[in-house]
Structures are given as structure tokens and as C-alpha cells.
Image: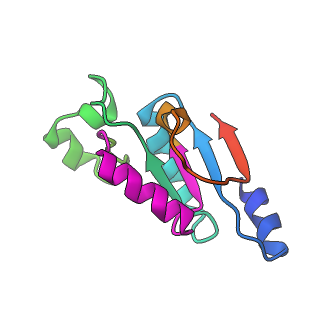
Amino acid sequence: LQEHFCRAQAVGKSSRVIVFAQFRDSVSEIVLMLRTLEPAIRPHHFVGQGKPPKGSSASKSKEQDSEQKDEHIRLNGMKQSEQQKVIQEFRNDKYNVLVCTCIGEEGLDIGEVDLILNY
């Protein structure tokens, strides 16, 4: 992914990428890892509206959440308005990587992308 953006930057081109992951916890970890590569890679999560399954990092108690605040992104469901905002910001190049659960495959008009990765 880093190489993809380096090549695009070398020819003066912007690029957009979508990464699909099966689980919200995976989405969280991928986004955190990609944030270490900012500003070249500007990731954002994109998940559905449903509640996370019990036992996932997003469903842990507030006490556990405060202890692990910086280690994980808590991914609760995104409201439709939040999803639309993220898609618009992706189109406007605020983010150049969307890390999605299967919601990104479900008929949403995300727009043109240069690379799709399945994790």
C-alpha cells in the first residue's frame, strides 16, 4: 500500500484505495497501523450500522475502554449520516484509504478507486 501511494505521488497523481476486512476489530487494527504512515496514507474506518458482537473490542466495558484507550479504535456502528459524511470526505480527498467491513460492498456509491485490497 505504501509503495502504491509512493508511485502515485512520484507521477503527481492522487490515489484512493479501499481495504476490505471481515471483522471490525481487523478494521480497527488496520486503521491504526496505516496511521503510522500519515500523511501519505490517510485512512478512515467505514463500518455498518449494526452493533458489534459481544466480546469484540468495540463492546468492552467503559473501564476496559479507558485502560486501552490508545491501543484500539472502538468501532461501534456508524449512522447513515456518518457513513455519507465519510464517503464525501473520501471523494474530496480528506481520506485516501477507506478500511471497510462488507458494508462497503453493499451497493454504496463510493466512487472511483485505484486499488482494492481484501484482508
53 on left or right of 99: left
Quarter assignment of residue 64: top left
Q: Residue at x 33, y 53 (%)?
A: 82
Q: Residue at x 51, y 33 (%)?
A: 106
Quarter holding the C terminus is top right
Question: What's drawn in magenta, residue-wise?
Answer: 76-99
Instruction: Inspect the magenta stretch and tell me whether residue 91 lies in it.
Output: yes
Q: Residue at x 77, y 57 (%)?
A: 4
78 on left or right of 118: left
At which x and y percent is residue 86? 43, 57
User: Is there any visible trace of residue 30 in the rendered image?
Assistant: no
- Direction top: furthest residue: 54
At which x and y percent is residue 80? 32, 46
Instruction: Inspect the magenta stretch and tell me whether residue 113 lies in it.
Output: no
Q: Decide which of 77, 63 is in the foreground and name it.
A: 77
Q: How is the image coloured?
A: rainbow
- Vertical arrangement, residue 58 with respect to residue 97, above or below: above
Q: Decide which of 87, 59 is in the foreground and name it.
A: 87
Q: Decide which of 79, 46 is in the foreground and name it.
A: 79
- Vertical arrangement, residue 21 with respect to residue 86, above or below: above
10 on left or right of 23: right
51 on left or right of 34: left
At which x and y percent is residue 104? 52, 39
User: Is there any visible trace of residue 57 in the rendered image?
Assistant: yes
Q: Residue at x 60, y 53 (%)?
A: 111
- Vertical arrangement, residue 103 with respect to residue 88, above or below: above
Q: What is the tally of numbered marks visible in this picture?
A: 0
At which x and y percent is residue 74? 31, 44
